[in-house]
Amino acid sequence: MRPSLRTPAARRYLGPATAAVVVAVPLAFTVLVGQGNDVHELAQSTGSAWVASPGAGTVTLIDGPSEEIVDSLPSPGAAAGDDLGVVQRGSSALVVNETRGTLARVDGATFAGGTPVLVADPGSPLTVLEGGDQAYVVDATRRTTTVLDADELTLQATISLSSTPGPGQTAVDGDGRLWVVDSGGSGIASFRGSDRVVRGPADASAQVVLVQGKAVLTDLSGGRLGVLRPDGEVAGWTCLDVRPDDDVQLLGSATSPHVYAAVAQTGNVVVASLSGDCQDVVPVAGEAGHDFGPMVQSDRFVFVPDRTTGRTTIIDTADLSTTDTSELAPPGHRLELASKDGIVFFNDLDGGTAGVLTWDGTTWRQGEALQKYEPADASLTEVAVPQEPVPAPATPPTDPAPPAPTEEEPPTAPPAGTQPPAALVPAPRPSATTASTPAPAPTPTPGATKAPPAPPVVVSLTSTPTDVQSGVPVSFDATVAGEVTSWSWRIATSGGTELATATSAGSTSFTFPDDGDPNVVVTLTVTGPGGSSAPAQLPITVAGPPVATLTVTVSGGTVDIDGTECSDVCAVELTPGTTAGLTVPSRQFPAVFDGWGGACSGTAGCDVVVSEDTAVTATFHQAPVEPEDCLGYDHGGLTVVAETGGWLLTDGPSRMLVLDSEEDGNNALAVAQHFTTQCFIGRPNAEMEYWNGPSPGAPSLTRTDCIPYDNTNLTIRSAPSGWQLIQGSMLMATFETEADAGRGLVVAQASGRQCFVGRVSPPGETTYFLP
């Protein structure tokens, strides 16, 4: 059992007696750390820091002011050699295990390790970022971000990224917005809750860093950088003097508008300004080709870890002077740094030491190397590791029993020091050989920690039916391996808007609304005695309700589809079995309707039942119009003269009309006096006669003979006798040619009544129109 040690003195492990090294750099400082930290960065929030020891499978808490080890304990669910990283949250730690795809919390008050939560496939590269009360787990393999409650590690949302971010291509800015660059080159996108920004341009090698809490896009291939606006566009570019093939470590300043770039190929740190054109260069390695680790900042000081030498260069950005520490880790080891509250922590990820760099008001002082775990711990301590189900061991074949020892020949003891203590002897590996006699149960090893059960795993997630349609119930079914105590279903849009949740075992059902977002993600998390599974996701596209499409193609005119005008190609989606009404508006001359085609025929309105995709055509032609034919006359000479066979209307020189009776003649005279011109269609044997003139009102006749009509429902059509002007079913006039009929239509559309003089006897008839 691991000793319960809680005082700094009780867990202080010192390396070889190493004198403190003083690094001469002037000025006191305050440490500032931006939001959003990669899994291998330590974002500190107190004067103490948790550090990881992947080789031992442990995490260690270091108290900065006292330079002591507070506690060292096995990482939850980890084994020696697992790829571990720590993100600090207050006094507690979020421990990321990329080897097993888990995230666990270690409580800073009780030092208790929580149950690991499966957040990704084992071995997937992960980036864990902290933003307020949330932890963002960016999974480049599945192209998702899982949003967790940072304290409880409960699922809040799953965001589809449509991106594969690489190292340095994710960050959470001061406004809580997640920025993601696609290493495939499709661009950059950002998210804040369900607020999703349209993807902006970004090169595949671009990175995003935080400068004074703002997201800055660094275009390494273009040698430039700029602040990102909330809409994903860059506000303005400034230069960054690096080459596209450079290996670069980037750090955004928390206190000034600068970006620091440590370039392995040159051994220099380039200082780029967001407010200027050029930059400064600070040599930090005596020769090119050094392996720089992630940098940290403390006020005006920038710390550049050199993994090639194990040393760190401290840059005073006030005058760009530099000072080197002595060796903080063996050359070639992964040396990492963290900064908080006037202290810079260093940690050897590949070894057993860590320590602090402290500011004494005048200089930086390098503390003694602290042993993160006792050497025996690394090789003998049994770490609790989630185990995959293992088949029951079979009994090996029975061999002849060895001869019993005699008093003359006592059993030979092993050489001293060759056998480990009995309490730590590993159990023999089960044999796969079949035998008839079961092997005896192994005796529990005293002092060994019992391994907790593994979390359950969601094996498959399917929908029935496979093609999901709104308005139709769908069942989501899961197959799970392992013991499950609770189920958590979540149905949400791809933007994060929650539609439904459920806790039913095995399956859940839902009916999607007709007017909802078609892009949906179904997420299932199951929990058992061994913890929670990785969230399993089923992206689906919800189709709308069943539809039948009516396509109407109109050539040369306009038709109405259920009252909606259509003059080109119109597609209307209808519920199958719906009846659509097609009509032809009359007032569109000279466009003349020729008739329907497809599912309709004739020239009348058409009601078509749309049970499946249906096509209708409507064809028009442009009709010719005869020019107007009008004659003027002398108003002062108008008179009616009796003659053989009738009464003549004349202006003196012209014989205008012959009427049957004196009354008809006087009525024709009143019409002529009211208008100014006499017009004809189809002379010499006029098919229609009408009068034009500016006089308003109506002429004063002894007998008015008028027929009203609907001038909005007029049309002309071909007939055996010629061309007809009709209003609905009423025949108004017949013409020899289409051009004559066209003129008659134009005249009739300008009025609303057709009036006659002497209609009883056609030889003396005349026609005029009134509003």
Image: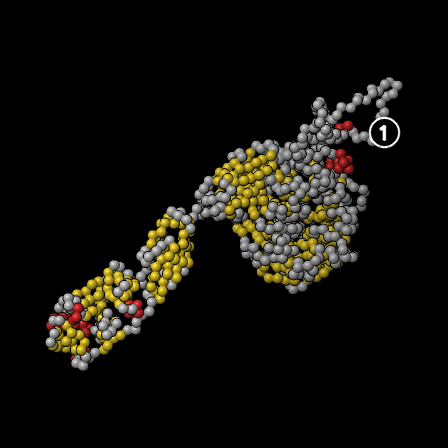
Q: Position of residue 544 (x, y in %)?
A: 45, 47
Image: 409 above or below 10: above
Instruction: Give the residue at x 76% y 43%.
Output: 351
Image: 144 above or below 206: above
Q: Is residue 173 left or right of residue 271?
A: left
Q: Nearer the viewer, residue 705 or 501?
A: 705
Quarter of the image where one finds residue 253: bottom right
Q: Nearer the viewer, residue 603 or 406?
A: 603
Instruction: Give the residue at x 53% y 34%.
Output: 505
Looking at the image, the residue that sits furthest to the bottom is 653
Q: Nearer the viewer, residue 429 or 73?
A: 429
- Give the residue type at disc 1: Pro
Looking at the image, the residue that sits furthest to the top is 407
Q: From the image, which quarter does the N terminus lie in?
A: top right
Q: From the image, which quarter does the C terminus lie in?
A: bottom left
Q: Position of residue 460 (x, y in %)?
A: 57, 39
Say what secondary structure mark 1 lies in.
Answer: loop
**Residue 563 can be seen, yes or no:** no
Q: What is the total number of numbered labels drawn onto the structure image?
A: 1
Looking at the image, the residue that sits furthest to the front is 720
Looking at the image, the residue that sits furthest to the right is 408
Q: Is residue 562 left or right of residue 473?
A: left
The residue wearing badge 1 is 415
Instruction: Give the residue at x 52% y 40%.
Output: 463
Q: Is residue 276 left or right of residue 691?
A: right
Quarter of the image where one finds residue 84: top right
Q: Is residue 337 left or right of residue 632?
A: right
Instruction: Give the residue at x 85% y 29%.
Output: 415
**Residue 453 can be seen, yes or no:** yes
